Image: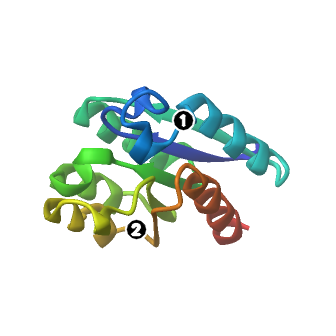
Amino acid sequence: MAKCIYILNGPNLNLLGQRQPEIYGHETLADVERACAELARAAGVEVQLFQSNHEGEIIDTIHRARAGAAGIVINPAAYTHTSVAILDALNAYDGPVIEVHISNVHQREAFRHHSYVSLRADGVIAGCGVQGYELAVARLLRLIA
C-alpha cells in the first residue's frame, strides 16, 4: 500500500480563487490538489485533500489520519487562531505536520499572528501563496522517506 499524505483545509478555503484574490490569488483548491498530487505521485505517495467549514469535521479527519496518513499538511484558516481542539487532535497524531498559510499572516491583523497549530507543527510555511502547499508536500516527502 502506498503512503498517503492528508492535506486539510479549514473554513472558506472552498472559495479559494474567488474570495479576496488580491490576498489569496486566483488558483482554486482543485489547482492545489492537482499540483500536490503530481508532486507526491512522483515519489510514490498518494494525496487526499479535505476541506471543511466545520471544526468537528476537521478534527474527525485528523483522527482518521492516525490510521492512514504518513503526514499532514494543514491550513486551518481562521481556526488557526482559535482552535485548541484542532491542536489537541494534532497532538494525538504521531506523524509529521506542516502548517500552511497562503498569505503572510504576520503582515496582517494582529489576531492572525498567533497560531495554536504552530505549537504542534513540525514546520510552518506562510506567505508563499498556494505554492506553500507544494513546499509543504516536498518537506513531508523528505520527512517520511
* Residue drawn at (61%, 54%) of the image: 131
In this view, the mark in front (2 or 1): 1
Q: In this view, does 73 lie to the left or right of 3?
A: left
Residue 2: image location, x then y, percent: 76, 45
Q: In this view, does 123 lie above or below 105?
A: below
Return the residue nearer the eye: 16 or 71: 16
Residue 40: image location, x then y, percent: 75, 49
* Residue drawn at (49%, 31%) of the image: 17
Q: Is residue 4 left or right of residue 60?
A: right
**Helix, strand or loop at disc 1?**
loop
**Residue at the spot of label 2:** 121
Q: Label 2: few (<14), some or many (≥20) within 10 Å?
A: many
Q: Name the kind of residue labelled 1 in the image.
A: His
Quarter holding residue 64: top left
**Helix, strand or loop at disc 2?**
loop
Q: Which mark is residue 26?
A: 1
Residue 23: image location, x then y, percent: 40, 47
Q: Label 1: few (<14), some or many (≥20) within 10 Å?
A: some
